[in-house]
Amino acid sequence: LHKKITKLNLQKGQVVNIYLCGPTVYDYIHIGNLRSVLIFDVLHRLLLHLNIKVNYVQNITDIDDKIIAKARKEKRTEKSISDYYTQSYFDNLALYNILLPTHSPRVTNYIPQVQEFIKNLLEKGTAYQQAGEVFFRVGKSQEYSKLSGQNLEKLKSGQEVVPENKENSKDFAL
């Protein structure tokens, strides 16, 4: 995270690891979702063209407040919602001839690790519990917004008023 261009000296047969944050599968994808996928698809294809092996991982967030809310609204299970929209997502990738990730781990397969990570954040004070929810405390993270170069104080949260269950409107649920 130093904002410098570093030349990659890749050799034929070398493996490049790529991680792209994948979709939260509560609805159909839109152009905003596809933008980053398309950019990484071009990179993926370029590397393959140069005979560079690619280990491309894109997670699937298959449990989330939006998934839970949609399941309740439609009187379905969270799993049925996430399974349906995960399949729809991959169908759309195929429709647009986008190369599939090598691996697509689902968040629900890593719940114990996520819980342990959140526990560590709570112990460090970079997360807090409020009204039965756990939030990431953006202001306590030295690294937050480092990559984007944004000034945390100038970032808009999308909310004019701090919700009662948050210390800061920029904090987000874990």
Image: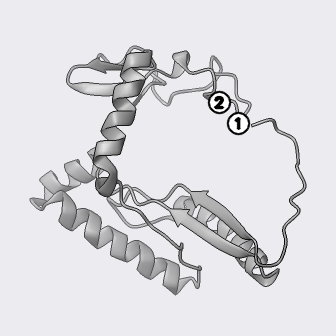
Please state the horizontal and vertical placement of residue 157, each as a whole percent of the image: 51, 27
Q: Residue at x 28, y 63 (%)?
A: 82
Would you identify the image quadrant in which residue 61 lies?
Answer: bottom left
Q: Residue at x 88, y 47 (%)?
A: 5
Figure check: 135 above or below 116: above
* Residue wearing tag 1: 148
Please state the horizontal and vertical placement of residue 110, each as a whole percent of the image: 33, 51
Tell me the CA gap for discs 2 and 1. 5 Å
Q: Quadrant of the C terminus?
A: top left
Q: Is residue 76 visible?
A: yes
Q: Is residue 174 visible?
A: no
Badge 2 amino acid: Ser
* Residue wearing tag 2: 145
Q: Nearer the viewer, residue 29 or 80?
A: 80
96 displayed left or right of 163: right
Figure check: 140 above or below 92: above
Please state the horizontal and vertical placement of residue 138, each as a whole percent of the image: 51, 22
Q: Quadrant of the N terminus?
A: top right
The reply to whether discs 2 and 1 touch (Cβ–Cβ < 8 Å) is: yes
Please state the horizontal and vertical placement of residue 10, each as a whole percent of the image: 84, 67
Badge 1 amino acid: Ser
